[in-house]
Image: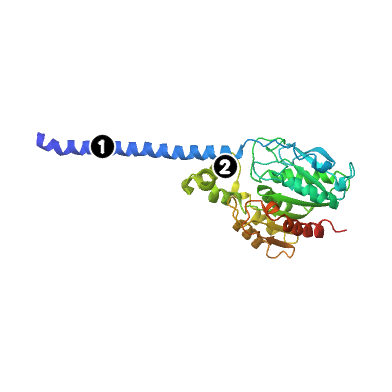
Amino acid sequence: MSETSLQPNLTLNVRSKKRRRIILILGIVLLLVVGLVFFISYKVMDTLLHHPRDTNVSYDLNIDKTPYQEVEFKSLKNDNTIRGSFFYANGLSNKASDKTIIVVHGYTSNRLVKGRTNKLVEHFVPKGYNILAFDLSSQGKSDGNMITLGLNEKYDLLGAVSYLKSRDHAGDNIGVIGFSMGAATSLLAASESADIKAVVADSPFRNAGLFLREGLPFFSGLPAFPFSYTSTWMANWVFEVDLDSISPMDAVKKMQDKPVMLIHGTGDQQISYKNTEIIYESLKDNPSAEVWYPQNTEHIDAINHYPTEYFQRVDRFIDKYIGKE
């Protein structure tokens, strides 16, 4: 065979080898990029679900010398020991009322709700209500090693309800006031418990998966695509936390005859008030549902920004559905 006839074959072989080399390099680069995306997504979810605890629970335990009791009970999930504070109605030590308000805090918080529990205790205890404020699993001083954005926390709240039912008449009339993730948790638990008579949900998200996908760029600085999707997938696959199943907007559809009060400031940059609009739409057939959008108010800050109106509204609601004889 002549050299002239071999030349085209050699050229084709060289081009084929170059093409395979380029494809191999591109494949390796793609795998590295995909691996990096999933590694970052893992770190994002690991940080989100294993946030350090806020254990400063000392400064509210002497509110105007209101008698209180340190209490423990079990979550109805994972058998975690949940720790909290029980404040006696009317300041009467060891004599509980038959009306109790449970306070449910949000993400990276504890039973104090950054001082909001103080205000609730100072206001409602003289009106004849007990207050039970507790630390959700993996937060404050309660057991646990992972925050699940309401998936398991609802069982902490249901455990609190069970605990109150064991305290003579303290569990006869139970209302819940929840903030942020605690508001979402309260709606989830109330949809499963007839013992929770009424709920005040301050600044809830409508669905945890949607919340993360919409809010991840704000909280992490990462672009929405692809990280919003890979992070929720990582939460489900690695940490077994199905964020899309944590859905207050769906849970409330089972609560068309339970009193629900929604509060959400229009200036909320963490969880848009649009979340509450959608939840309220799910309650459109509930005659005992109501909503308040305090103007230009930041996340869970209506109690501080409009304290007089806040307590007027919440008073009327709680007294109507929990305080009635």
Q: Residue at x 47, y 48 (%)?
A: 225
Residue 316, visible in the rendered structure: yes
Above or below for 303 versus 167:
below
Q: Along the line of sight, which residue is nearer the eye, 3 or 151?
A: 151
Name the foreground residue: 90 vs 317.
90
Look at mark 1 in the image and give the residue it sits on.
Answer: 18
Q: How is the image coloured?
A: rainbow
**Residue that appears at 64% across and 57% down:** 276
Residue type at mark 2: give it.
Ala
Residue appearing at x 81%, y 60% in the figure: 320
Q: Secondary structure at mark 1?
A: helix
Q: In the image, is residue 322 above or below residue 42?
A: below
Please say if 325 is above or below 49: below
Callout 1: 10 Å neighbours few (<14), some, many (20+)?
A: few
x 72%, y 56%: residue: 310
> Are the two marked residues, 1 and 2, in contact with CB atoms closer than 8 angstroms?
no
CA neighbours of label 2 inside 10 A, class few (<14), some (14 to 19), many (20+) = many
The numbered dot on residue 192 is none
* Front residue of 20 and 53: 53
Q: Nearer the viewer, residue 316 or 79?
A: 316
The amino acid pointed to by label 1 is: Lys
Q: Which quarter of the image is occupied by the C terminus?
A: bottom right
Label 2 belongs to which residue?
A: 235
- Which quadrant would residue 77 be assigned to in this image? top right
